[in-house]
Amino acid sequence: MKKLLLAVLFAAANASAADQRLAKVELEQDLGGLDIVATATTGRVLILTLQNKSAELADCVATFEGGLATPVRRAAKVKPGKTVTLSVPVKDDVARWHIALTCKPK
């Protein structure tokens, strides 16, 4: 019984470690002259954080592409001095993500 319990615990630990694999992210930015700080983090959800350091409202669109999945598009308006988070759930084991971010003054 102890051996079975240890085997189950070992399998669970390996499965949770596999979920923590981080994919590489390529971030392509066209910020339209705005002072936007973009940060991408991976995990079970791919998160793109946008911080607007400029004095203008920013209209941003991000296209997330990874693996064989259809590209996902997210849009947000970011007020001056504010931060916005865009996210995409990760359903497959994707080794590399490409994010195309375009922002323009509104």
Image (cartoon, rainbow, N blue to C red):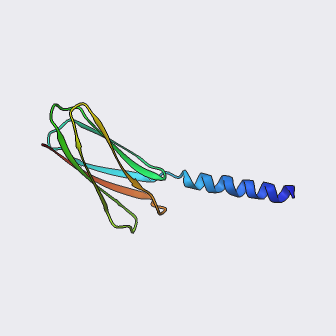
Which residue appears at 47% of the width and 63% of the height?
92
Q: Which quarter of the rendering shows the N terminus?
A: bottom right
Residue 38 percent location from the top left of the image: 30, 41
**Left or right of residue 85, residue 22 in this image:** right
Residue 47 percent location from the top left of the image: 39, 47
Near-viewer residue (33 or 60): 60
**Left or right of residue 58, residue 87 in this image:** right
Which residue appears at 68% of the width and 55% of the height?
12
Q: Where, by quadrant of the figure, is residue 95 drawn?
A: bottom left
> Of all residues shown, which one is farthest toward the left?
106
Q: Where, by quadrant of the figure, is residue 64 drawn?
A: bottom left
Near-viewer residue (89 or 69): 89
Which residue appears at 70% of the width and 58% of the height?
11
Q: Is residue 1 above or below residue 33?
A: below
Residue 62 percent location from the top left of the image: 27, 52
Q: Where, by quadrant of the figure, is residue 77 drawn?
A: top left
Q: Which quarter of the rendering shows the C terminus?
A: top left
Residue 103 percent location from the top left of the image: 19, 46
**Left or right of residue 81, residue 66 in this image:** right
> Of all residues shown, which one is farthest toward the right?
1
